[in-house]
Amino acid sequence: MKQISIIVMLALSLLGSAVGVAQAADIRKSNRPDGGNLNYGEYGRPATLDPITSNEMISMRLSELIFNGLVGISERQEIVPELAQRWEASRDGRTYTFFLRKDVTWHPKPGEDAKPFTANDVVFTYNIMMNPKTITPLKVRYEFIEKAEKLDDYTVQFTLKRPVLNALAKFSFKIIPRHGPSNPLYLTREDYFVQHPIGTGPYMLKNINADREIVMVANQKYFKGRPHIDQFTAKPFADQNILTQALTFNAIDMIVLVNPRSIAEIQGDKRFILQPYNALSYSFFGYNLRNPLLADKRVRQAFGYAVNRQEMLDAFFNGQGTIISGPFAPGSWAYNLDVQPMPFNTQKATELLREAGFKQGSDGIMQKDGKKLALTLLVPIEKESEAVKRVVLAFQNYLKNIGVSVKVEFKEWQSWKENVFADHSFDIIFASWVFDDSADISSLFHSAEIGPWKNNFGGYSNPEVDALIVESKLTLDHEKRRTINRKLHALLADEAPYTFLWTLTNYSAYHKKVQHVAIHPYKFFSYADEWYIPAAAQK
């Protein structure tokens, strides 16, 4: 799909479940054959491969193959046991006790025997995730936990600062080994572990080859039973057209996100299955509010009116999506349908710029106090595609029509991320968020999340927004929370820290030889250990 820039992971908590005791899942018993290799295409490469420092969807998909959480989510979207075989919750909702499986081992490090998974690893993961020196988008999601304690080698207890809605689902965060990172206190992107992860999951990282392909092999000792397919290989592509060609020429067996313009071509090929799946996601233009020219919301609102979203969606994505108006994932219970997307209105856009004190100069560019309204839009070159190029050039042209100069700069992927997330040296970016919690936008817009490698990259700060985010997280009344989030939606739509664009319809395509394929809406590979390739189709 023609999404660009950064696709970001947020931690799961959208599912409800009765709190109590669950039984461990049975070891897999089926007559499905083992064997075969599955090569799948990804649009771009992940910066890190661990589940804590990463903020990319590509990494999150890999985490589903390599790691496990205490609990998981079934195909029926029910909370099920994973590393915890059962759990108990106190009546006041403040204490959760997890009883761990005793038959789980970590993937072995080269030259070493596999080590057992214990409560030490769970406590270690929580502590390293919450350490102030660990830069992770997950930290803000688990601030409600007061402490994690080991009761014995296979029992761990979490004490919450307060009861929270759907607390059990939040314990799906991935557990990493205490003997994994080189630093026992906090995790950085320079740690060897983030590029060479070991987990408890159905697949083990074998190697990353010279072409940056990530090769994973079946974990023969996986506690749910050996996964059927022998090997998964993630192949990176910088161009979506080549990605489609690779599928049709049998260089890969699966595309995670199909370019909307390729849907008809793939649909007409009987070798492949085109499967739609839902994702809580949206695309946007994001602004750096540290720039005084962008600090005035009237300027940001003007940009919103200047952009013809429907025209871009129809022309560049074959209309395969929905225009949005605010910060929550469309289709979620938190989305405020009463807030309409900004209409395309260049006259209104020009009026807002004049209200903000801008006048058109002799060269046609708006200026104020002798400073031109000239901005730079950063795009990572690794994510460059035909559709992305069209979107950013269309944006450039729309703003030119209201007297705004936008210079588009394509940057190498790592350099782009450093510019945006570390140094904040940008004016505008084009990006997409993919959520696994439809109602928690705290890491995007709360002022506490401003800083290097944090998700509030634009430096947006509003005390009213902060207060509403905190209130939403504290309430246990679902309807009250919905009301708070509707107010948040309306407020952020008006404040316009982003120009909210659209949510695209997701499609995966795969060769029909791959069978029993079930796709998790946003983690994708959650059920991949059950996929199989018939013996006759195995290479």
Image (cartoon, rainbow, N blue to C red):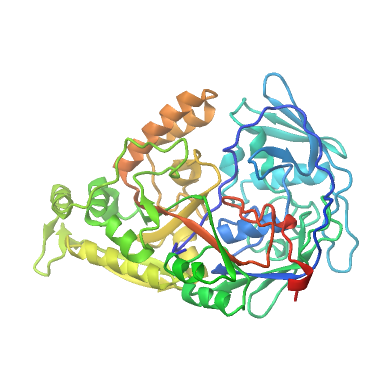
User: Residue 286 placed where, x, y %?
Assistant: 37, 55
Instruction: Please determine whether, in this image, residue 83 is positioned above or below residue 412.
Output: above
What residue occupies the far left of the structure in this picture? 362
Q: Residue at the top extreme?
A: 91
Residue 310, percent across and down?
Answer: 29, 56
Choose between 174 and 111: the one closer to the eye.
Answer: 174
Query: The C terminus appears in which quarter of the rendering?
Result: bottom right
Number of marks drawn:
0
Quadrant in the rendering for residue 13? top right
Relative to the observer, which residue lies in front, 406 or 397? 397
119 vs 438, left or right, is right
Judge from the rendering whether residue 2 lies leftward or rightward of residue 521; answer left or right.
left
Q: Residue at x 78, y 61 (%)?
A: 228
Give coordinates of residue 468: x percent, y percent.
43, 31
Depicted 251 relative to depicted 149: above or below? below
24 relative position to 390: left or right: right
Q: Quadrant of residue 387?
A: bottom left
Q: Is residue 45 visible?
A: no
Q: Is residue 501 above or below residue 172?
A: below
Q: For residue 89, which quarter of the picture? A: top right
Question: Could you tell me if residue 400 is visible in this image?
Answer: yes
Residue at the (40%, 62%) spot, across then down: 425
Q: Where in the figure is residue 175, as x and y percent of width and height?
A: 73, 48
216 or 147, nearer to the observer: 216
